[in-house]
Image (cartoon, rainbow, N blue to C red):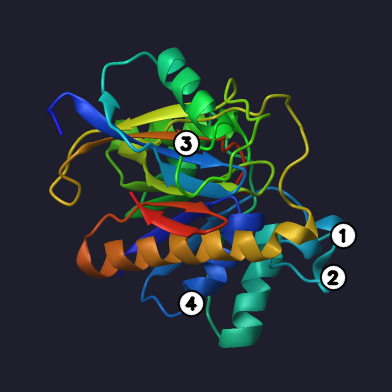
Amino acid sequence: MEENEAMVNVTWNGNNGDLPDPVNYDSTDADILQMVQEAVRTGGVPGIPADQNATFTNFVVDRFGATEARPNKLISIRPKTPFGS
Amino acid sequence: MKTVTIVGVGALGSHLVQFLRNLDVNLKLIDYDRIEQRNTRSQFHSKGGVGKGKVQHLAQTMQFLWGIKVGTVPHKLTSDNDDQLLSGADLIVDCLDNGEARRLVQGFVRRAHVPCLHGALAADGSFGQVIWDEDFKIDDEDVVGAATCEDGGFLPFISIASSYLALSVQEYINNGKKLGFHLHGGGAVRR
């Protein structure tokens, strides 16, 4: 993996998986969400069953730099988490 | 002895308190809310506590079940009292349910350089985060006062998320390590 690339982890409908290929870490949130939406709709994310109605417009893009424990950059696509109490 | 302050003792916070009962720390609980009947389906609050303050009743429960004393602050966190209520903690755990209050906690911990762990759930119970403040992004409700994941059907997932929160607190207090997790229906991913 190149230094400016990141794996993309996706959570959709309680399922979780990684895009098969890394993406450019500097891609815009909109581009990443569009890419992920297309992948989930077509069954392109191992671990997440294809869902033709998947919509990621309201999802959050988190970016994590490389660490000792995780040598590669990571982009995480997740639902909003406003609740705890 | 270190002090762990838990802000919000509803779904995540109430279970977290009982999962920390073996940790050698002072626990301080902050929440102004009272127990409602519906809370008893998803929170560690019993029907006998309906109508009582959450922190006071939880303190009674901890004392009754395990002989553990916890500190209670039955006040709403505001910009006028955040410094007073949150100071003195070695670790703050945010288990709140709204962006406004979370921003107060985040503002304080960043000003005061206090370690802070956040617990956060998606409204549909499909996803949760146990995440340290340096990586935490506050998500507001789409509609203020919108339905939360506190329906009784979410209790197992809430309990799992609370367990991972407790694990992170324990690891930090005992070994100084900061563990974060993403939680979903299929399990937990370390972050």
Query: Which tag is nearer the camera, tag 4 or tag 3?
Result: 3
The secondary structure type at the circle numbered 3 is: loop
Could you classify mark 2 by the number of other residues whose Cα lies within 10 Å: few (under 14), some (14-19), or many (20 or more)? some
Quadrant location of residue B86?
top left
Provide the residue designation for mark 1.
B37
Quarter holding the N terminus of chain B is: bottom left
Provide the residue designation for mark 4.
B21
Provide the residue designation for mark 3.
A44
B30 to A2, vertically: above or below:
below
Confirm whether circles 2 and 1 share one chain: yes
Could you classify mark 3 by the number of other residues whose Cα lies within 10 Å: few (under 14), some (14-19), or many (20 or more)? some
At 43% from the left edge and 80% from the top edge, which residue is drawn? B22
Q: Chain of mark 1?
A: B
Residue A54 as seen in the image, left or right of residue B110: right
The secondary structure type at the circle numbered 2 is: helix
Q: Horizontal and vertical percent for residue B98?
A: 62, 35
Provide the residue designation for mark 2.
B47
Do residues under tags 2 and 1 come within 8 Å of each other at their CB atoms? yes
Residue B24 as seen in the image, left or right of residue B149: left
Do residues under tags 4 and 3 come within 8 Å of each other at their CB atoms? no
Do residues under tags 2 and 4 come within 8 Å of each other at their CB atoms? no
- Residue type of the residue flagged with mark 3: Gly
As measured in the structure, the alpha-carbon distance from the residue carrying label 4 to the one carrying label 3 is: 44 Å
- Residue type of the residue flagged with mark 4: Arg
The secondary structure type at the circle numbered 1 is: helix
Q: Horizontal and vertical percent for residue A65?
A: 22, 34
